[in-house]
């Protein structure tokens, strides 16, 4: 009997110790919670989102402008009277840089510098938003540059291609617009979620 009591007491002691240890794991002090939810790296990711948005969008814009600009220069030698209509791809490529600028400014304005005010979730969302806008604009710039260069050269020889050129450029520009829309939605999500600590 005494051996059974000893075993039961030991089992109860082990069970109580396990419960206490589990409770200690689950309890997180407010300071530890703040360090976990509001790290200093959150601002880094937010700033990186603003940077990649602007840099990649400007890369796409620069490539599109340069590539289409070569076609416009060629158009100027073949048919100088059509240059003003042929400059459309250059203008559309320049708009892509504005998309990146808009997203970068919005992200920058939403990065909070106070202590325990900018959560890691917001930083990651802003980083993703910057990538969405920047890489979409980069892809659009590549498409606009190639389509614009080829179409403008063809427009110098055949005037009827102008409408088809505009349609191709609109669909290429839409790629950057899709990234801008998703970046704005991600920014709204980042602002809604608050990682509070009790």
Image (cartoon, rainbow, N blue to C red):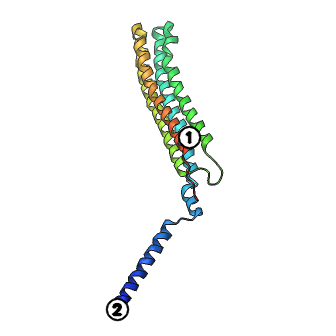
Residue 146 x %, y %:
41, 24
Asked whether, in this view, residue 68 is left or right of residue 50, the answer is: left
Q: Quadrant of the N terminus?
A: bottom left
Q: Earlier in the sequence, mark 1 or mark 2?
A: 2
Q: Residue furthest right?
A: 114
Q: Which residue is mark 2?
A: 3
Residue situated in front as seen by the camera: 78 or 68: 68
Residue 36 x %, y %:
54, 58
Tell me the element at label 1.
Answer: helix
Q: Are marks 1 and 2 in contact (CB under 8 Å)?
A: no
**CA distance separating discs 1 and 2:** 69 Å
Q: Quadrant of the C terminus?
A: bottom right
Residue situated in front as seen by the camera: 24 or 40: 24
Residue 84 badge: none
**Nearest to viewer (mark 1 / mark 2):** 2
Q: Residue furthest bottom?
A: 2
Residue shown at the point (57%, 57%) measured from the top left: 197
Bin the neighbour count of mark 2 within 10 Å (Cα to Cα): few under 14, some 14-19, many 20 and up.
few
Residue 176 x %, y %:
47, 29
Bin the neighbour count of mark 1 within 10 Å (Cα to Cα): few under 14, some 14-19, many 20 and up.
many
Tell me the element at label 2.
Answer: helix
Compared with 138, 68 (above or below) is above
Compared with 136, 115 (above or below) is below
Residue shown at the point (43%, 10%) measured from the top left: 156
Q: Which residue is mark 1?
A: 50
Compared with 42, 181 (above or below) is above
Residue 188 x %, y %:
54, 39
Asked whether, in this view, residue 29 is left or right of residue 4, the answer is: right
């Amino acid at each position: 009997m005494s051996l059974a009591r000893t075993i039961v007491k030991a089992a109860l002691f082990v069970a109580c110790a396990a419960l206490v240890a589990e409770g200690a794991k689950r309890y997180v002090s407010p300071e530890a919670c703040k360090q976990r939810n509001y790290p200093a790296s959150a601002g880094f990711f937010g700033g990186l989102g603003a940077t990649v948005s602007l840099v990649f969008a400007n890369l796409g814009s620069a490539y599109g402008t340069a590539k289409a600009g070569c076609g416009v220069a060629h158009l100027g030698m073949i048919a100088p009277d059509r240059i003003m209509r042929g400059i459309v791809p250059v203008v559309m490529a320049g708009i892509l840089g504005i998309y990146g600028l808009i997203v970068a400014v919005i992200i920058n304005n939403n990065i909070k510098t106070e202590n325990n005010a900018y959560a890691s979730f917001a930083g990651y969302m802003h980083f993703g938003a910057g990538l969405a806008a920047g890489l979409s604009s980069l892809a659009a710039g590549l498409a606009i540059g190639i389509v614009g260069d080829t179409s403008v050269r063809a427009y110098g020889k055949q005037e009827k291609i102008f409408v088809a050129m505009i349609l191709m450029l609109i669909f290429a520009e839409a790629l950057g617009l899709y990234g801008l829309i998703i970046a704005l939605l991600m920014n709204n999500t980042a602002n809604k979620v608050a990682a509070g600590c009790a």
